[in-house]
Image (spheres, rainbow, N blue to C red):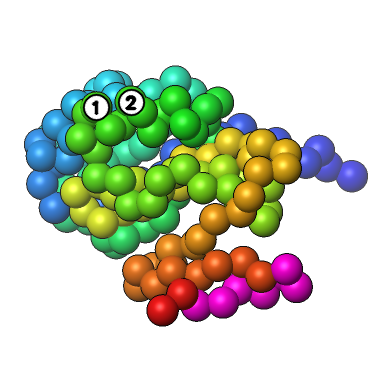
Amino acid sequence: MSPTAEFEHVTPILRVADFDAALAYYEHALGFTLAWRDGRFGCVRRGHVTLMLSEGSQGSPGTWVYLDVSDVDQLYQELLRTRARIRHPPTNFPWGSRELHVFDLDAHVFRFGCAAPAGEPLGEWLDEAGTRWTPQPDGRWQRVD
């Protein structure tokens, strides 16, 4: 029997329309730093998270990426100060996560999440189309009109 390969980490490659504009947003609004760059392709880093940015290739706008963070509420306060494009404020969800959703300039959505505090109320979900849903006691979701 051969050994099983261990997965180490993941680095999404996100397509951007304008590398320089995207880089400026990631640095100034989201707090990432440039790790390296080769023309219109490069990598940004914050903590243990790395993201590659590729101008005009490798991916599609509107990708959703989940990033574990230590404190969503603290990050939310930081991102309010930097004027990041907040999609959905910190919210508790039935799957045990407290999440903050943020757009980049190319409609990618970052779901920053940490463990939801026990006993706190659940919030609405905002789907891809911008429709709001509220969790029901039976586990289903009801559209909010």
Residue that appears at 49% across and 33% down:
72
Residue 17 position in % (x across, y down): 14, 53
SS assignment at label 2: helix
Instruction: State which quarter of the image contains the N terminus.
Output: top right
* Residue identified by numbered label 1: 81
92 relative position to 65: left or right:
right
Q: Is residue 134 above or below residue 39?
A: below
Q: Which of 17 and 113 is in front in this view?
A: 113
Q: Are marks 2 and 1 in contact (CB under 8 Å)?
A: yes
Q: Which of 39 and 141 is in front in this view?
A: 141
Q: Nearer the viewer, residue 72 or 120?
A: 120
Q: What stretch is highlighted in magenta?
A: 137-143
Q: Is residue 48 above or below residue 22?
A: above
83 relative position to 98: left or right:
left
Label 2 – label 1 distance at C-alpha: 5 Å
Q: Which of 111 and 46 is in front in this view?
A: 111
Residue 124 position in % (x across, y down): 51, 61
Near mark 2 (Cα within 10 A), the count class, few <14, some 14-19 or many ≥20, is some
Quarter location, residue 29: top left
Q: Is residue 133 above or below residue 72?
A: below
Residue that appears at 31% across and 60% down:
62
Quarter location, residue 58: bottom left
Instruction: State which quarter of the image contains the C terminus.
Output: bottom left
Residue that appears at 55% across and 67% down:
134
- The label shown at residue 78 is 2
